[in-house]
Image: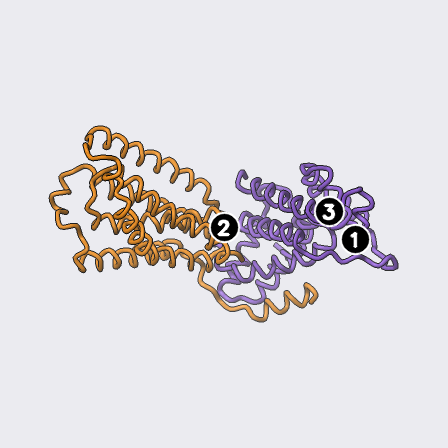
Amino acid sequence: MSTTSLAQEPTTGSRLPADDEWGRLMAAAQDGDGIAYRRLLDGLRRWLERFYARRLPPAFVDDAVQDTLIAIHEKRHTYDRTRPFRPWLNAVARYKWIDRLRSMGRARTDVLDDDIAVGDHESAVLSATLLDRLMAELKPAQSAVIRLVKIDGFSIEEAAKRTGQSGALVKVNIHRGLAKLAAIVERQAHVD
Amino acid sequence: MSTDDLIAGLTMELRAVGPRAPRRELALLALVGGIELLLCLAAGLVRPDFYLAMAEPVLWWKLLSLALLAAIGTVTAIAALAPDRSPRRGLQWLGAALFVVLATGAYLMLSHPIVESLADRVDWHHGVQCVAKMVLLALPAVAILAWLARCGAPTDCAATALAVGIGGGAWGAFVFAFACPSDDPLYIMLWYLIGCGGVALATRLVVPRIARW
């Protein structure tokens, strides 16, 4: 199988040939094969970009992809080459997703300058369908401020004005909402 | 740093790694646990009436129960160190095993009524000493499991930490059971539960910080 076909691997599908190919590449990487590792990371990068694009606000996708690639590198010895690669990859990506949701709650929010052009921002946000579905499980007050501050880039004060909440309440709702999102994802992971 | 640069950097620093070997990890724990037990026995820490106590079902209930809990806890913790393995099923087994252990203890307690007062039976002064010794004896197993958790990649750190604590705590209690002179199921259930529970609580608080990756 070519590297190109690996890169086209989507998040759907139960038994895809890429599983075995990625597993073989990881096994080779465990043995120190740099060429196989490069091919693997290139393929995983594209897969992770799609994975996180559906689950995180666009501004967080790149960092999440890089974090996960580093985690894959540091924990590559935990891949059991006798088992399919996909569940291992999914577990690592989901763990880092939960991690990212938690860190979003702690991170300072930088307000975007009005002059900065954001290409196709809206469509990117709307494409995060899974994130939207998860947000629906939060209280409206929580999802509203998370959307405003973490996705749309408004300041705490602006979000407070728009929602009628106090600044402190906005912060609390963001923190609690993101913690709840992380808990929901974690719970689903244990059910799966 | 761009993702391209990151990938180039990771590729450049690639070196061969041996895949995790859970059986080797279990063997390491068994070796350290075995040495600990042998050292305790060699140091004469066995209760003086051990051979007489072997005729009593309480001793076997105590030893087998703790060995069972230690085995399930340890296997659960080791299995959970792979990202795609969850410790939840193992914890359910631990819960079921604990229920059977306590039910058996309650049966033994009711079938051999003891006339002493409750305060004498609980004997908190000795109980606290027992707990301290159990915790001390649990430390080697807990330390190794925590180190393995740091080297591994648990994705459910909280549940893994609990399994580490129950496995390690039960092992410490198992070793201590050879020295413990009490044959009262009430005393055993109370203080051993406090000892193992204390270790599990401590690992639940500490190990997720160590194992986070």
Colour that chain B carries in the picture: orange
Which chain does the residue under circle 3 lie in?
A
Read off the residue under disc 2: B157
Asked which secondary structure carries label 1, the reply is: loop
Q: Position of residue A116 (x, y in %)?
A: 85, 59
Q: Which amino acid type is shown beneath numbered disc 1?
A: Ser
Judging by the rendered image, the residue that carries numbered circle 1 is A155
- Pointer 3 local density, CA inside 10 Å: few below 14, some 14–19, many at least 20: many
Q: Position of residue B27 (x, y in %)?
A: 32, 56
Three-letter code for the amino acid on which mark 3 is drawn: Val
| Left or right of B167, for residue B62 | left
Disc 2 versus disc 1: nearer the observer: 1
Q: Residues within 10 Å of mark 1 (few under 14, many from 20)?
A: some
Numbered disc 2: secondary structure:
helix
For marks 1 and 3 on the same chain, the one whose residue lies earlier in the sequence: 1
Residue matched to label 3: A170
Q: Which mark is residue A16?
A: none
Residue drawn at (67%, 68%) of the image: B5
Query: Can you give x and y, in whole percent of width and height, for residue A113 in the image?
Result: 84, 59
